[in-house]
Amino acid sequence: MTACDGPGGFSLVIDGRDRRFHSYAARGPGERDDGTLAPTAALGSIAFAPDIVVPAARAMHDRYGSAIYDQYGFLDSFNPTLAGTHAPMTKGRIVPGTGWVDDDYLGIDQGPIVAMIENWRSGLVWQTMRRSPHIRRGLRRAGFTGGWLG
């Protein structure tokens, strides 16, 4: 979960439960979890947990297909909980069988996806970072030691 677009600021009763939906918001467990998912949150973690992320990406793509994935990759966010067309949404659309889907591709989301896939594939991002004297100096000033800084 991460900050992403949402369907808007409103409440609806779904399956007998009052549900509060948000527009753009930081999302996470608890109060801000309205069921909205951002593919970048999972895919940006591929270099750290490929055994979890690759199946998650395949599952999102296989289950929701072109509703959430198109020519530029995954759309910013989607919410399978919000399936009714009566929702007073401020953006996005309801896709039958999928739920609410944002209509934006955001570079701030696509960038981490592409960078971390390449990093998982070749290690390029981390190798480049390790060679940067500015990053090394900053990490040392922040108190980091050992590992590849040694």
Image (spheres, rainbow, N blue to C red):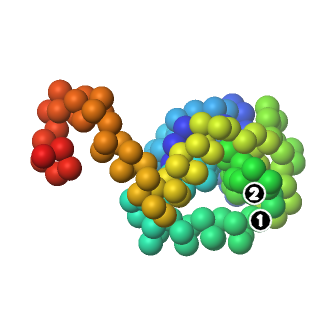
Q: In the image, residue 44 lies at what x, y percent?
A: 51, 52
> In what element is the residue under mark 2?
strand
Viewer-side residue, 89 vs 108: 108
Q: In the image, residue 120 lies at what x, y percent?
A: 46, 61
Does 91 appear above or below 94?
A: above
Question: Is residue 126 among what the camera can see?
Answer: yes
| Amino acid marked by disc 2 | Tyr
Question: Is residue 34 among what the camera can see?
Answer: no
The residue at the point 25 percent across, 29 percent down is 138
The residue at the point 75 percent across, 40 percent down is 104
Viewer-side residue, 116 vs 135: 135
**Horizontal relation, residue 138 to residue 32: left or right:** left
Does 49 appear above or below 72?
A: below
Q: Quadrant of residue 99?
A: bottom right
Viewer-side residue, 26 vs 81: 26
Q: In the image, residue 28 lies at what x, y percent?
A: 48, 44
| Amino acid marked by disc 1 | Gly
Q: In the image, residue 88 lies at what x, y percent?
A: 82, 36
**Horizontal relation, residue 144 to residue 83: left or right:** left
Verify CB contact (< 8 Å) between mark 1 and mark 2. Answer: yes
Callout 2: few (<14), some (14-19), or many (20+) C-alpha neighbours within 10 Å? some
Whole-angstrom CA distance, mark 1 to mark 2, is: 6 Å
**Horizontal relation, residue 133 to residue 124: left or right:** left
Viewer-side residue, 77 vs 100: 77
The residue at the point 49 percent across, 53 percent down is 116
The residue at the point 63 percent across, 70 percent down is 58
Callout 1: few (<14), some (14-19), or many (20+) C-alpha neighbours within 10 Å? some
Does 99 appear above or below 50?
A: above
> In what element is the residue under mark 1?
helix
Query: Which numbered circle lies on residue 69?
Result: 2
Residue with the mark numbered 1:
65
